Amino acid sequence: MAQMSKGSPSYEASDITVLEGLEPVRIRPGMYIGSTGPSGLHHLLVEIIDNAIDEAMAGYCTRIDVTLMANGSARVIDDGRGIPVDDHPNYPGKSAAEVVYTTLHAGGKFGDAGYKVSGGLHGVGASVVNALSTELNLEIYRNDHHYQLFFKNGGKPQGKLKIVGPSPKGRTGTTVTFTPDPKIFDDVDFRAQTVTERLQIMAFLNRGLEIRFVDERKGREAKETFKYNGGIVDYVRHLNNAKESLFRKVGFYEQAEESQEVEVAFQWNSGYYESIHSFANGISTIEGGMHEEGFRKAITNVVNRYARKRNLLKEKDENLLGEDIREGLTAIISVRLTEPQFEGQTKGKLGNVSIRSLVERATNEKLADWLEENPKEGGQVVAKAIQASRARMAARQARDLTRRKSALDGAGLPGKLVDCSSNDPRECELFIVEGNSAGGSAKDARNPRNQAILPIRGKILNVEKARSDKILKNTEIQALISAIGAGVEADFDVTKVRYDKIILMADADVDGSHIRTLLLTFFFRQMTELVNNGHIYVAQPPLFSTLVGKEKVYLGDDTQKTKFLLDNPTHKNDFQRLKGLGEMDYDELRDTTMDPTKRALLQITVEQAALADEVCSILMGDDVPQRRHFIQTNAKDVRFLDI
């Protein structure tokens, strides 16, 4: 074994490096904001917004203005109390405002005096933003004065906090303008949609708070205002807007104790998936936690008791499972507590046991009262849960049958699958193609060693509006499940997937886009790990071809065709529209869609699959204006759907 080379012989006290002030943040930014990519960039803005939100939760702020400025800076204005401006007792000669923006773990969120409830726990937000900015301008309106403190080059104060004028009309609050450092971040361009989505959620969670957004960047100018007097009740209505609700009412209850409180809003829709969103002090707890646990346990008990009491469940009937009751449920659980205990760096899971007890008690009492006061809606909830229970049992039988068939038939591969010869999943590709004619062309164009072809017939079932038992009995879906070979739903095991790339190959027209959308929704809902692990791709066959001399040139869409004509104004040859894959000969199909050296594949992200799922949900309804608005709003992200 080779001996490791020795390092420097010196290891004394003088060799110990001490990082002062904000130096650690600039050297290891990922420790404080997660990454230096887009999520980290937006984290800066969220930290400043959250400080303003804390003022709103404390009852002192009614309006927040967020502006993406033309020069690349971002500005957040609130009408709260304003950061304290007097000298900090532990830092003689330094204002409290300067300490907050230059010292890690300094803030008003550790004792009881500043904030009873807060989203920021560690007191690093403002100082981290300052450390990772080329400049930051802090303005405070307090004590009838307008104060200002300017920082540059990673948080270095340019002088002391000073009065620059009177506070107009007794105004109070804080204004922060900062410019992210391009030396730290991969890209310093804020994405407006990411910002507005966050602002809208914060407006939902803080009833009556007005949040204004302005984008001043050239070519991207926009204004939007968020204010919801109904709070999380409006949030549930918003989430169910594209779905068919079981009833018009949105249920709501709340309960408070000395150091914690809970609000819950809920409504069932006719769909088959639950949508429960939980928050703690305004932070999205995407991994759930004690508050969600208390809600799930209590709602199961309450609905079963109600069903028994009204004789909707007979004595011989088994109790409804939680998954039966939560089918089609949209719910928001928002808790606020003095000392939240988050698990993990991302604060994704809440660990306070006391909040579980509060949510459980509130749900047991208040939800039971709501069902008694709304017997029509209560009956609809129970009826839907009973249907879900029956469908669950039927789906279990269908899965068992699928397993038995696979065991009897060997590999259980569908007859129309044209498989490849390689047994190494890492190099194998499965092309899911629309129709037998396209399947025939693809079969001739493929590399039989590692490319398999599965033709499907037209538009598969929209799984957004079908129960599990119906999904599993569908012929085309059975073929997909058998070909991929890793099971489905709860039984899905991504390690058993037979192909590394599963490529959706449909015509370059609206019908083809619809088929892609339905397939993406199926994979997103039934084989989620395929999407999460990057196994799903969309082939992008061209729409046109033309001859340039003796060489055939392919053009993806009308935009590329227009650009080609601008670049080649003397071009006289006609354009062939390659609308259907079945109309392309195998050479054309190989050269444009199947040859790995020439094709253009789009690897589908979780966000794109979720967007396809939302489109399928919208397609269930008859609200054409709402559908058009959704597509216009998401035009950039759904360009591959073309619906």
Image (cartoon, rainbow, N blue to C red):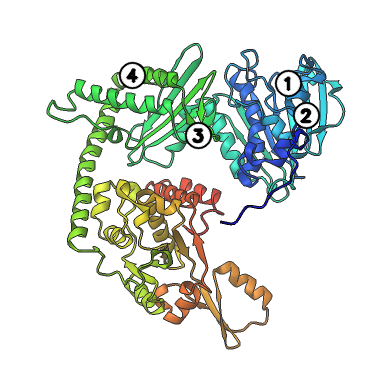
| Residue ID for mark 4 | 364
Q: Amino acid at mark 1?
A: Ile
Q: Amino acid at mark 3?
A: Gly
Spatial CA distance of label 4 from label 3 is 26 Å
> What residue appears at the point 32 percent right and 48 percent down from the top-left corner?
489
Q: Which mark is residue 138?
A: 2
The answer to whether 96 is drawn above or below residue 225 in the figure is: above
Which one is earlier in the sequence, the residue at label 2 or at label 3? 2
| Residue ID for mark 3 | 348
> Where in the figure is residue 346, as x and y percent of width and height?
54, 35
> Helix, strand or loop at disc 2?
strand
Spatial CA distance of label 1 from label 4 is 41 Å
The answer to whether 284 is drawn above or below residue 361 in the figure is: below
Which one is earlier in the sequence, the residue at label 4 or at label 2? 2
**Taking 133 as reference, is 306 left or right?**
left
> What residue appears at the point 33 percent right and 64 percent down from the top-left corner?
458
> Helix, strand or loop at disc 4?
helix
> Where in the figure is residue 240, as x and y percent of width and height?
42, 37
Which one is earlier in the sequence, the residue at label 2 or at label 1? 1
The answer to whether 336 is drawn above or below residue 551 in the figure is: above
Q: Amino acid at mark 2?
A: Leu
Which one is earlier in the sequence, the residue at label 3 or at label 1? 1
> What residue appears at the point 67 percent right and 40 percent down from the top-left corner?
29
Q: Which mark is residue 83?
A: 1
Between 361 and 357, the one lying in front of the other is 357
Q: Are marks 4 and 3 in contact (CB under 8 Å)?
A: no
> Where in the figure is residue 369, as x and y percent of width and height?
32, 17
Q: Are marks 2 and 1 in contact (CB under 8 Å)?
A: yes
Which numbered disc, 4 or 3, marks the residue closer to the eye? 3
Spatial CA distance of label 2 from label 1 is 10 Å
Quarter in which the N terminus is drawn: bottom right
> Where in the figure is residue 612, as x and y percent of width and height?
44, 52
